[in-house]
Image (tube, helix red, strand yellow):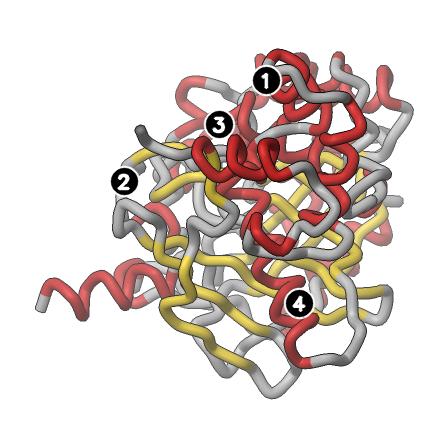
Amino acid sequence: MNKQSIYGLTFEQLSAWLLERGHKKGRAEQVWEWLYRKRVTDFSKMTGVNEDCLKLLEDHFLIETLTEHVKQESADGTIKFLFKLQDGNLIETVLMRHKYGLSVCVTTQVGCNIGCSFCASGLLKKDRDLSSGEIVEQIMKVQLHFDQVGKGEKVSHIVIMGIGEPFDNFENMVDFLQIVKDQKGLEIGPRHITVSTSGLANKIYEFTDLKLQVNLAISLHAPNDELRTRIMKINRAIPLDKLMPAIDYYIEKSNRRITLEYILLKDVNDQKEHAKELADLIGNRRAYVNLIPYNPVDEHSQYQRSDEKSILSFYDVLKKNGIHCGIRIEHGTDIDAACGQLRSKQIKQTQN
């Protein structure tokens, strides 16, 4: 029997599973506390839980399914983990230190099929979706790292911006959100969680209707269809006249501001006229533009990082046109900074 990760069950799912097998609801509360508050990784260490219940859980579930393959630590405190899954696939998870807390960027798929022409994540096509348990375990592995070093630090924020398109793994991503938000467990507030999508409009509507109160970010990267299609092939299927109404729906129904991510590529999308066009596209929407300096990728040598003057000029045009924006503070520039870069490098080394 293939055992699944117990981290993949929401509290309601775990409760229902145990009730169906003759155990009281209180058992689920006990197990949940051991998993997420006391953070044990061995069922036998869940003292006080009925032995029959523990045997049942051990027969059907695993607690650990990820193993640390590589860990890179940056001078600024950023840590990039490369985890190996049970099937041998590799995924990346990144811890970033901010003034407001510790943020973990999780991966949702093994590889990516979106195919953005500047992105390291898409160098290797999607092999499969991650289960909700594999996504949750990324958070748990980072938290266990802090537990072991004994500093008493706690993961406080989550960004779903790692390898893959989260909305292409929708159900598992939603279960992940329900698990990490649960007040009986990790208790990470929805306003401390951000999901990033390349623009799957139909899923934006579905996500909004769930009323999860989680932040939404859109990988925009261009102010018009011609340019966006050139660098993001998804724009052929979902052009701006389909994407922008979905963004409006999210803003209106959630009463939340949306974040628009914009990677600045030298002489491609970083000119003043692009900034003005972007400002016109946004108009008076409740939006924040996150300007992102590009981390060059060897395989995408046609793209280079915009110089500081161009970045500041782009920022100034947006500000003068009334657009809320900022330049993202960089993390981990002395390690494999671009998302997917470490994974791609490790796979190539294995193949050579």
Marks 2/4: CA–CA distance? 26 Å
Q: Earlier in the sequence, mark 4 or mark 3?
A: 4
The residue at the point 27 percent across, 40 percent down is: 125
> Would you name the residue on which mark 2 appears?
125
Residue type at the position of mark 1: Lys
The residue at the point 78 percent across, 50 percent down is: 318
Front residue of 33 and 256: 33
Q: Residue furthest left?
A: 352
Residue 165, image x and y in percent? 48, 35
Marks 1/4: CA–CA distance? 28 Å
Residue 26, image x and y in percent? 80, 28
Residue type at the position of mark 2: Lys
The residue at the point 86 percent across, 17 percent down is: 252
Category of crowding for the residue at label 2, using alpha-carbon neighbours closer than 10 angstroms: few (below 14), some (14–19), many (at least 20): some
- Asked if residue 315 is positioned above or below residue 2 in the image, the reply reads below
Q: Earlier in the sequence, mark 1 or mark 2?
A: 2
- Asked if residue 278 is positioned above or below residue 328 in the image, the reply reads above
Q: Earlier in the sequence, mark 2 or mark 3?
A: 2
Front residue of 167 and 64: 64
Q: Which mark is residue 169?
A: 3
- Check disc 4 and report its element: helix, strand or loop: strand
> Would you name the residue on which mark 4 appears?
96
Residue 254 picture quarter: top right
Residue 324, image x and y in percent? 85, 48
> Would you name the residue on which mark 1 appears?
203
Q: Quadrant of the N terminus?
A: top left
